Amino acid sequence: MRYLVWSLPITVAAAAFTYWLSTSASSDVGSASRAESYDIEEGALLYAENCASCHGAGLEGQPEWRTPGADGRLPAPPHDETGHTWHHPDSLLFDYTKLGGATLLARQGVEFDSGMPGFADVLTDQQIHNILAFIRSTWPDRIREVQAARTEADEQRGEN
């Protein structure tokens, strides 16, 4: 029962944070938020080297990824169609990967440690784009279409 008392507010806060992030975050990294081309094979290798330890070799995420741990952090979500990655435009996914959750949110005035590290010192912009292209390539057509539409709407608003 004690678990429910403190986990419910954390879950609600995390859901509100995710909604806010999906509706108000914009690319302010200052680097290219789009790539001219993508190398999906390289993206798969880089994903295996840099992302799979948290997000799973099959993009399945960590168990109970919607339930905060004892530290208040949510476990790494899946990047397959069962997760929420596809709910976000490319610019946000790029910025979140490059800067990490805490840094990106701090730039927007929010103090929250999502647990996602930044990869700016590990991966080039092109490598990040390749990883994201690999992830997108695994989604069913309908999910890719929805995510592409969100990316296009984000670009039309000039938020990247």
Image (cartoon, grey):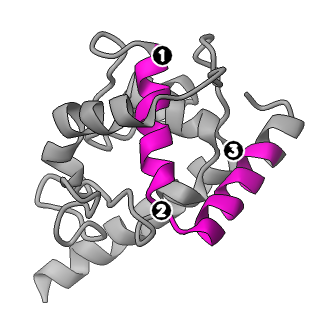
**Secondary structure category for the residue under label 2:** loop
Residue occupying the point 60% across, 11% down: 31
**Secondary structure category for the residue under label 1:** helix
Residue occupying the point 54% across, 29% down: 38
Give the residue pinned by disc 3.
Answer: 24
Query: Does label 1 or label 3 sit earlier along the sequence?
Result: 3
Circles 1 and 2, Cβ within 8 Å, touching? The answer is no
> Residue 93: percent from the left, percent from the top?
52, 39
Query: Does label 2 or label 3 sit earlier along the sequence?
Result: 3
Q: Relative to the observer, which residue lies in front, 153 or 24? A: 153
> Which residue is the extreme one toward the bottom?
1
Q: Is residue 10 above or below residue 42?
A: below
- Name the front one of labels 2 and 3: 2
Q: Is residue 1 above or below residue 57?
A: below
Give the residue pinned by disc 2.
Answer: 84
- Disc 1 and disc 2: Cα gap in Å? 22 Å
Image position of 114 (left or right of 31)? left
> Residue 75: percent from the left, percent from the top?
22, 57
Residue bounds of the magenta highlight: 125-152
Q: Is residue 95 visible?
A: yes
